[in-house]
Amino acid sequence: MLRTETITLNLGPQHPSTHGVFRLRLQLNGETVVGIEPVMGYLHRGIEKLCEQGTYVQVIPLTDRLDYVCSMTNNQAYAVAVEKLLGLEVPERAEYIRVIMAELTRIINHMMAVGFLWNELGAYFTPAMYCFRAREHILDLFEMTCGSRMMCNYMRPGGVSGDLPEGFLPAAKKFNDYFKGVIDQLETFLNENEVFLARAVDVGVLPADVAINASITGPMLRASGVAYDIRKVDHYSVYDRFDFDVPTCSNGDVYDRYLQHIKEMWQSVRIIEQALDGIPEGEVMNDQAAKALRRPPQGEAYGRIESPKGELSFYVVSDGSANPYRVRIRPPSQINLSALKEMCEGHKIQDIVIILGSINLTMADLDR
Amino acid sequence: MTNEEILSKLRERFPEVVVDVPELIDFTVAIKPEAVVDVARFLHDECGLDYLALLTAVDQTERFEVVYHLWSIKDRTTEPFVLKAYIEDKENPTVPSVTPLWRGASYQEREAYDLMGIRFEGHPNPKRILLWEGFPGHPLRKDFENRTYTFEELKPTRPTGPEW
Amino acid sequence: MQDTMSEEELIEEQIKHNIFLTTVDKVYNWGRRSSMWPVAFGLACCAFEFIATGMARYDLSRFGMEIMRPSPRQADLMIVAGTITHKMAPQVLRIYNQMPEPKYVLAMGNCAISGGPFPSYAVLQGANEILPVDVYVPGCPPRPEALLEGIMKLHDKVMHQSIKTVPWYK
């Protein structure tokens, strides 16, 4: 009598295409995946426990290291939560600076997503080279402002830590004009590529109702057709002064998630242009912030922003002392994995790799 | 539906369940832990709160709290509806799981069990997620002192064989 | 001119231009340092600066190192870029054991040197608890120029090793 068995394959924590230390246990029937179980925690650093040991301002460098590709938006999410807790107002110039930095960070993240997706597809590092070249220009702008390339530690509750230097605005404008040519070039090379279309269309489809039920947010949700963008829903910061759209795609497969990232980069370029034109003069930090942070009121606050990966939010519980009592971080990468079974089962093993690439994970955000 | 309307409908439907409505920045309703699944199903089906943003476990001195932040995507609400479950039993805290209603709660409940020790009944895969099964203790509890371990100290707690 | 030189002088002329005299040590070390292949082993944030070092602005392929081998059996340098947590530590050791000798370890970033900004229950306080580290590159994350300096120091160290005293031939 013939008897078949499934193979258990371990796509281990060290693998060239899992964006860091992420482990998958696959049950394979030949090459088709019939069961999938992710194992995470290989980068769990205990950040939530460390947040309770320091003061409110000492938490900010730890938030930098959460989702290390987009460190500015992590700072912004924490600042929004603490400002809600303390009832602080942010000066206008600081809000405009925050918008510019957040959109530049969104561009970095989406370029990384596109570059690494193509790395998984097999175009070994060539599109990633183009994307990293654009990233270097943005990192020059960050270094001009806050002194560091990646771990910026720039946005504080109450404003930003320092004003923009002299040459920042012309340099940012020059970068913005140059960057439109870069996205154009990427679209020309990559959008209609036959191999990509054959491999990515109808692979890893995520229906909209499954996405909402699985608490998925960000570009993954919008690629499945739900136009939910926290910048438009909550009107946090000064986003309601800018004119931009919320693009969506209809199918929810790997190709749509890639296209969603490209469309959102065009919108970010629009926002940066309007912000650079309209930035007012003024202070960049609320004077009451330093005093209020030393003795915050007792209570809790939930502050959320639209980070490049999804909804990033902080739930801060305070008991009246100078250290936070509990800081809980909503990890967009971990929650975006909740529907992995639906997306992956029935596909071949090489499709799993590109589906993971299209979800745009960052391990430090997943494990904290 | 506004949050106050939801609260009044909740009080009509489940008369004994609401324990407290504390005065906090976000609209919060605290209930008994046994009623979590029924209340959650009511909120999901009849009040349109289809998006569970965050599930947190907090270790207050006299009790554990499990906090659910709920929003509605189809109504585009801008204020969360915060549901809290007050767990008085600190020795053996248990709460029913909401994973059958909101899939997004699955990893978050495993993490609450891993780091805080709260058991979720009815969860399809109740294993530790960020640390391994033999790790001594639940780190986010207030009586767990934050200390650093060396490699040798944690060696006997590790699983052996193909599991690791 | 060659007609006027005697045969011995002709041979000596040819020897000067075509034969090099050196030591076994120098050739052995030069071969090993000129194209070290790193294992693709990025753990956390430092991995991004490592990848940026391999990209167009700060080029790693001038050292012959731009191919990061996915399999440890084909690599001879392990750049520990990022935090080693207690859950990951046995896997790091496993990969180090799979690399064939001669092998070197470069600890990149504060987390690999001594736990970095995370004195917590889940982080191994330094890669040298489990691995023998040759070069430490501090920074959080270190700039690509700093990583290049670390790599050049490693090359220096390799050039000064002698085949009589290397640990894998003892």
Image (cartoon, coloured by chain):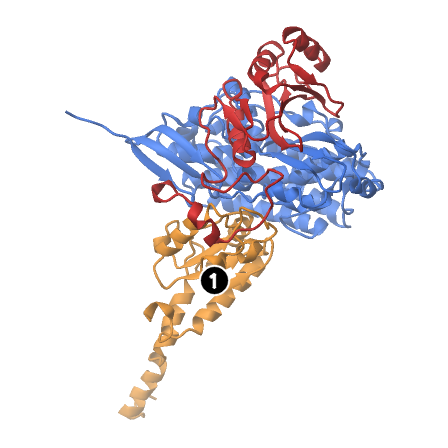
Chain colours: A blue, B red, C orange
Please report, as a chain letter, where disc 1 is located. Answer: C
Looking at the figure, which quarter contains the C terminus of chain B? top left
Q: Examine the rendering and report whether any part of residue C40 can be seen.
A: no
- Which residue is at the far left? A1
Above or below residue A128? Residue C135 is: below
Q: Position of residue A247 (x, y in %)?
A: 60, 25
User: Which of the 4 image quarters holds residue A8?
Assistant: top left
User: Which of the 4 image quarters holds residue B2?
Assistant: top right
Q: Nearer the viewer, residue B16 or A306?
A: B16
Quick check: C157 left or right of A99? left
Q: Nearer the viewer, residue A37 or C55?
A: A37
Q: Nearer the viewer, residue B162 or A362?
A: B162
Q: Position of residue C96 (x, y in %)?
A: 40, 55
Quick check: A131 left or right of C167? right
Looking at the figure, which quarter contains the N terminus of chain B? top right
Q: Residues within 10 Å of mark 1 (few under 14, many from 20)?
A: some
Amino acid under disc 1? Val
Q: How many marks?
A: 1
Q: Examine the rendering and report whether any part of residue C65 can be seen.
A: yes
Q: Position of residue C142 (x, y in %)?
A: 58, 56
The residue under label 1 is C133
Q: Position of residue C56 (x, y in %)?
A: 53, 52
- Label 1, secondary structure: give it: loop
Task: Please tell me which residue is depicted at 48% across the width and 52% down the height of the picture.
Answer: B153
Above or below residue C65? Residue A328 is: above
